[in-house]
Amino acid sequence: MTETPYLSLVIPAYNEQETIPTLLERVGRALEQIGRPFEVIIVDDGSTDRSGELLSEGIATYPWLRVLRLARNSGQTAAFDAGFKAARGEVIATIDADLQNDPEEIPRLLPMLDKCDLVNGWRQKRCDSGYRRMQTLLANRIRNWLSDETIQDSACSLKVYKRHCVEGLQLFTGMHRFLPTLVKMRGYSVMETPVKHSARFAGTAKYGLWNRALRALIDLLAVRWMKKRYIRYQVSEVRHTPPQ
């Protein structure tokens, strides 16, 4: 594809061989609805199953598909960062590869960018076990309390950004959970809207208590420090005005 895309969809993927064929089919159908050029960047985060093989086959089938491969499993933040830097679109969207985020939601969210810089999905009705829902509720409450935030679902991967939100944004491991806060710190506006959340139809979850809650708490303390120490100021240059 040589035409400059309007939309770049970035999708991290780690050992998702069961979902990739369906993911590619659904993403293609969904994004064709926007009526503008698009690209899909799937970042293979060091998969050890057949994900890489299936993605290579997908490149031959779907002209809008681009595949990046990380040399080793580096985590979602690294995968998002690689995708953001490779994206060519003026709008960047993100979802997870497990299809719990519905790609069909993206065309609905795009017009909302007329009123803000980032549209953040809010999984109000989660199709997870009670244990996972409890984890998420607790994590969001602690996150908002410590970071003085109001975002209901910061870790939802279904997001739509204006490109300037992520240009030059320095990310660190674990920061993908706090992207709305990082975008707001840069002076950009964030809107949150309810989105559909689907049950995982294949494969297994890659994140448990340690990498979802305890590790996130450590990262949250870093974000709290960054938010309080972020430099904000207004400046104007004083020019000499000759006497009349």
Image: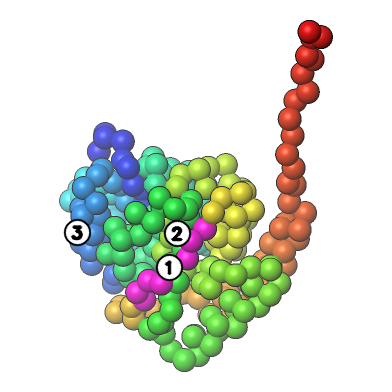
- SS class, disc 1: strand
**Are dots 1 and 2 in contact, CB under 8 Å?**
yes
- Residue located at (49% from left, 85% from top): 132
* Comes first in the chain, label 3 or label 2: 3
Of 42 and 226, nearer the camera is: 226
Q: Amino acid type of disc 3?
A: Arg
Q: Nearer the viewer, mark 1 or mark 3?
A: 1
- In the rendered structure, the answer to whether residue 35 lies left or right of residue 125 reads left
Q: Identify residue for label 3.
A: 29
Please state which of residues 178 and 76 is positioned toward the viewer in this rendering.
178
User: What is the count of numbered marks?
Assistant: 3
Residue name at image x 29 percent, y 72 percent:
18
In this rendering, the answer to whether 167 lies above or below 176 is above
Residue range (magenta)? 190-197
**Circle 1 residue:** 193
Quarter assignment of residue 20: bottom left
Instruction: For mark 3, give the secondary structure.
Output: helix
Q: If the image is split into quadrants, where does the C terminus sit?
A: top right
> Type of residue at label 2?
Val
Whichever of callouts 1 and 2 sits on the residue coming sooner in the sequence is: 2
Q: In which quadrant of the rendered view does residue 157 lie?
A: bottom left
Residue at x-position 75% and y-position 25%: 237
Provide the residue designation for mark 2. Answer: 119
Disc 3 and disc 2: Cα gap in Å?
21 Å
